[in-house]
Amino acid sequence: MSHFFNLLFGQYADYETLDISLEIIAVLFGLISVLFSKKNHVYVFPTGMISTAIFVYLLFKWQLLGDMLINAYYFIMSIYGWYIWSYKSGENNETPISSTTALEKKKSVGIFIATLLFVFIVYTVFNKWTHWTAYVDTVTTAIFFVGMWLMAKRKIENWLYWIVGNTISVPLYFYKGFTFTSFQYFVFTLLAISGYLAWKKHLNNNPQNSLK
């Protein structure tokens, strides 16, 4: 039992108590944020901003630049998403759940490629191509960038990106030694699947919103 415990949490023996506490708080707010997202509630953004702000600090301290960029982007896009989700146009309610248009799919590909190039440049400048995890980080960063952009626009396809990115991140963060964060991404994966099904059901009940 102790061997299993050490396997999961042994790396935290060298961490500062404050950092461990902050990681746990960030994970909790991250989980709360995804629950709000599944329920299609605008509180997904303020709770997510608390989580990402903490992770930006921790990841900068741990010199994980790709992960830090993801969370900094989340924070900025949360402000945008908060506005979009709350925006009302004339007599209409706030922006509804919808599917991506052909143009938005092209933009998603563009964001993915642009993010890959951006992270490649950042990692090259800071000489971070020292381990295979850097290449995985580059891909997951691009996946999450697209996912966050689609979520801010309330597009159902955002969940598909989260499912893929979260699934990759579970073993990746465990390998890096961040067990609590790895557990967070495992729960994120389950919630993303559930969120997709919930939004899909909503769209099926409101077909007029499918391609808005």
Image (spheres, rainbow, N blue to C red):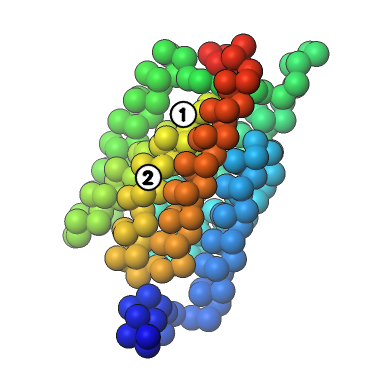
- Tell me the element at label 2: helix
Of 5 and 175, nearer the camera is 5
Residue 90 is drawn in which quadrant? top right
Of 192 and 87, nearer the camera is 192
The location of residue 153, given as percent across then percent down, is 56, 27
The location of residue 163, given as percent across then percent down, is 41, 42
| Numbered mark located on residue 9 in the image | none
Q: Which quadrant is the C terminus positioned in?
A: top right
| Numbered mark located on residue 165 in the image | 2
Q: Residues within 10 Å of mark 1 (few under 14, many from 20)?
A: some
Residue at left offset 20%, top offset 59%: 131
The location of residue 160, given as percent across then percent down, is 42, 35
Residue at left offset 23%, top offset 49%: 135
Q: Is residue 43 visible?
A: yes
Residue at left offset 40%, top offset 78%: 9
Residue at left offset 34%, top offset 25%: 109
- Tell me the element at label 1: loop
Q: Is residue 67 above or below residue 212?
A: below
The location of residue 65, given as percent across then percent down, is 37, 55
Look at label 2 and name its amino acid: Gly
Q: Is residue 52 above or below residue 179?
A: above
Look at label 1 and name its amino acid: Glu
Q: Which residue is mark 1?
A: 157
Q: Along the horizontal axis of the image, is 37 left or right of 197? A: right
Count of marks overlaid on the render: 2
Of 21 and 208, nearer the camera is 208
